[in-house]
Image (tube, rainbow, N blue to C red):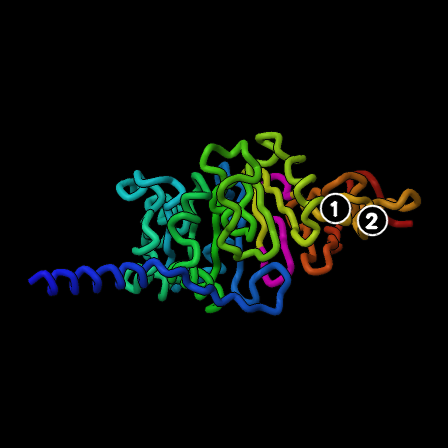
Amino acid sequence: MKKLILAVALTFSSALLIAQTPVTINQKSSTKHGPEKGSLIIVGGGGSTPEIWSKFLELAGGKAKANIVVITAATGDSAAFNTSSLKKIKKELGIENVTVLHTNSLAEANSEKFIAPLKKATGVWFDGGRQWRIADSYLNTLTHQAFFDVLNRGGVIIGSSAGASIQGSFLWRGDTKGPQILVGDHTQGLGFLKNSAIDQHLLKRNRQFDLVDFIKKSPELIGIGLDEATSVVVQRDTLEVLGKSYAVIYDYQTISGKGENHVKQDKEDYTASSGPFIFLSQGQKYDLRNRKVLETPRKKQEPVAGVSNNK
């Protein structure tokens, strides 16, 4: 009997060990920062605009095809009983095909049963809260790989606030003691945007200078800061701003005053900056691979009443 109990215990222990063994995430890509396939929408918190919701629905396949999974780990365990995220997303997108996934267990996140909804998903939404909770729940698990699989099928991943920062490879403000600690006890993000660190609530909370010294010491990384109700849409290595306020780009060359984006004294250039970062507003684009602002076509100027445009 003792031998049988020991055998069962060893079998259970082995199964638990396998369930908790870190998974090697397959994210091989020809891109430098963004996903090779699919899209990212990274939102600075404070709510999303109708344009951001519309873009999410479009990239998720439209009302007829969208199948959305909501990840609520950042909110904490209360999210397991709170249906507010589910109701809000259904309302904003006008669809019913929305599923909530919640766990704080790496073992559960490493199970085939748990990831089943993600195998059919066209879009994933990461709620706000504390980004380290997402890392603790999903980092290097089958679920983590399933997120990448959604992108590889051409789907979209969107996240706001903590759900924005977790998309970077370096987890900014990831300390369990509080978001005021910039580099904390959690420093690995889910890495959908490679070689990056992402900040949020930027201007609303006066955080615009926080990434400067970090990127100066980590020139291989690109820093992205987002104000509230503002997002960047990333496809491959191109980023486009969508929302009410500004996105801010932190690049080592710009910070050091040596890059293409730095203002030359004899040239006025609206794609450049004389400071340590670059502000971008809605519709502006940025080349992440080559670290430069892309000129966008200017809107045709409407004629002013009483003034002739004829020369």
Q: Amino acid at mark 1?
A: Glu
Residue on which the image places disc 1: 302
Residue 292 locus on image (x, y percent): 74, 54
Residue located at (61% from left, 39% from top): 245
Q: Which mark is residue 201?
A: none
- From the image, give the main secondary structure of the stretch colored magenta: strand
The numbered dot on residue 258 is 2
Is residue 76 shown left or right of residue 168?
A: left
278 sits to left or right of 232:
right
For label 2, the SS is loop
Any part of residue 163 in sight = yes
Whether residue 34 sits left or right of residue 80 in the image: it is: right
Residue placed at 43% from the left, 58% from the top? 140
Q: Is residue 234 above or below residue 161?
A: below
Can I make out residue 122 in this image? no
Q: Is residue 192 above or below residue 135?
A: below
Question: Residue at the location (62% across, 65% down)?
Answer: 31
The three-letter amino acid code for the residue at tag 2 is: Lys
Element under disc 1: loop
- Residue bounds of the magenta highlight: 234-247
User: Residue 98's image quarter?
Assistant: bottom left
Quarter of the rendering occupied by the N terminus: bottom left
